[in-house]
Image: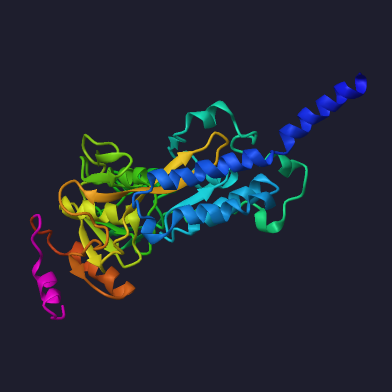
């Protein structure tokens, strides 16, 4: 009798440490269904998602840990080749999306029957076996905003729109440089350098935009969620600064970073210098799993509140300029010029536009 009792106890303990293959399969199916049912392009960019699912399901018997399952799902999402959608295990989700809001996994049964993995931490078996170097959590998730002062202009380089601290950091920069008594002469304006920014979350885009303007400059078009307006955060009140703003863009600006630049341009709040953006304005919707994993699914397309989407065409600069240093010099020159009325261009800009040197 005792042997049977302790056998039951041992079975329960082992069951909490090692997930059964069925639990891995359930997590896999939820991740696969999110793309099948909520991906913005119902043709999945020409990818046969059914076939992809079958191919990766065949690999499930080889999965021996939650980490291995996370990598398998991540590889499956990479088959979409959209440079956006991805899957993060709890450790990576905590590192990359700390404080970020997400939608709960839209399958009630997943919340009624937890996977058995500890929420927001390593998988249970990770404490019982050593982790290989390739599976160790990554280091610093983001390059923080880089701030410099040049020629009376505050230059802020944003490398991403996922970091939950990006808007608060930028708000602190604005407070610092516009504080009374900071300088004998006030700053001329801001240069927001988005070049190379791959984008990120609509929420981060809205928070950064809200520092410079308020309102409802975007709409999100989603086959599963419908079409709905996207406000700045906050949506109402006076923006943090009214100083002139230049945004630097290039062909590597994607997603929410394109939406940020496009909204600032359309509102007449910023002057854009550089090159046309990528035209890849899929919006990532983060879906949270009960165990802390997050599926980042391109579930919609970002567009201005009125007019055609930027998808496939990108955001045009007000002043096309090639070359990183030439773009920065043009931005400084713009802030040095008497600020024109809304939507009009100073004379030196017109000279460049017609091919003359300034």
Height in image: 264 above or below 216? below
Relative side of 293 to 252, left or right: right
Q: How is the image coloured?
A: rainbow
Residue 112, quarter of picture: top right
Query: Percent x, y for residue 237?
Result: 21, 34
Residue 2, quarter of picture: top right
Count numbered badges in the picture: 0
Relative side of 192 to 35, left or right: left
Height in image: 94 above or below 261? above
Height in image: 351 above or below 12? below
Q: Among all residues in the image, which is located at the extreme top? A: 1
Q: Can residue 220 be seen at all in this image of the molecule?
A: yes
The residue stretch that appears in magenta? 342-358
Q: Among all residues in the image, which is located at the extreme right? A: 2
What residue lies at 73% left-to-right and 36% top-to-bottom? 17
Relative side of 276 to 161, left or right: left
Q: What quarter of the picture does the C terminus occupy?
A: bottom left
What residue lies at 49% left-to-right and 46% top-to-bottom? 32
Query: Percent x, y for residue 150?
Result: 32, 63
Query: Percent x, y for residue 38?
Result: 38, 44
Query: Percent x, y for residue 81?
Result: 44, 61
Q: Can residue 231 be seen at all in this image of the molecule?
A: no
Residue 238, quarter of picture: top left
Relative side of 8 to 65, left or right: right
Determine if the magenta segment contains residue 347: yes
Q: Nearer the viewer, residue 136 or 171?
A: 136
Q: Nearer the viewer, residue 252 or 163?
A: 252
Q: What quarter of the picture does the N terminus occupy?
A: top right
Height in image: 140 above or below 224? below
């Amino acid at each position: 009798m005792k042997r049977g009792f302790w056998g039951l106890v041992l079975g329960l303990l082992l069951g909490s440490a090692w997930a059964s293959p069925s639990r891995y399969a359930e997590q896999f199916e939820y991740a696969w269904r999110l793309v099948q049912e909520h991906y913005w392009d119902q043709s999945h960019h020409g990818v046969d998602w059914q076939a992809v699912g079958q191919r990766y399901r065949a690999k499930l018997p080889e999965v021996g840990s939650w980490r291995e399952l996370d990598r398998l799902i991540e590889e499956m999402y990479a088959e979409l080749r959209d440079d956006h959608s991805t899957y993060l295990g709890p450790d990576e989700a905590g590192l990359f999306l700390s404080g970020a809001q997400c939608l709960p996994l839209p399958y009630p049964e997943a919340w009624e029957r937890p996977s058995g993995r500890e929420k927001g931490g390593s998988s249970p078996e990770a404490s019982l076996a050593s982790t290989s170097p390739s599976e160790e959590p990554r280091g610093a998730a983001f390059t923080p905003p880089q701030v410099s002062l040049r020629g009376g202009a505050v230059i802020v380089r944003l490398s991403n729109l996922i970091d939950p601290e990006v808007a608060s950091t930028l708000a602190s920069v604005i407070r610092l440089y516009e504080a009374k008594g900071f300088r004998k002469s006030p700053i001329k304006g801001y240069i927001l350098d988005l070049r190379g920014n791959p984008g990120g979350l609509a929420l981060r885009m809205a928070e950064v935009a809200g520092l410079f303007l308020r309102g409802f400059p975007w709409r999100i078009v989603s086959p599963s969620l419908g079409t709905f307006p996207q406000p700045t955060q906050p949506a109402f009140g006076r923006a943090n600064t009214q100083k002139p703003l230049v945004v630097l863009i290039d062909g590597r600006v994607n997603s929410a970073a394109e939406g940020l630049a496009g909204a600032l341009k359309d509102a007449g709040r910023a002057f854009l210098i550089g090159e046309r953006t990528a035209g890849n304005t899929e919006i990532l919707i983060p879906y949270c799993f009960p165990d802390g994993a997050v599926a980042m699914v391109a579930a919609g397309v970002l567009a201005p509140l009125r007019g055609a989407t930027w998808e496939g065409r990108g955001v045009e600069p007000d002043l096309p300029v090639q070359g990183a240093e030439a773009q920065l010099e043009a931005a400084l020159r713009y802030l040095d010029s008497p600020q024109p009325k809304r939507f009009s261009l100073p004379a030196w800009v017109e000279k460049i536009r017609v091919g003359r040197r300034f």
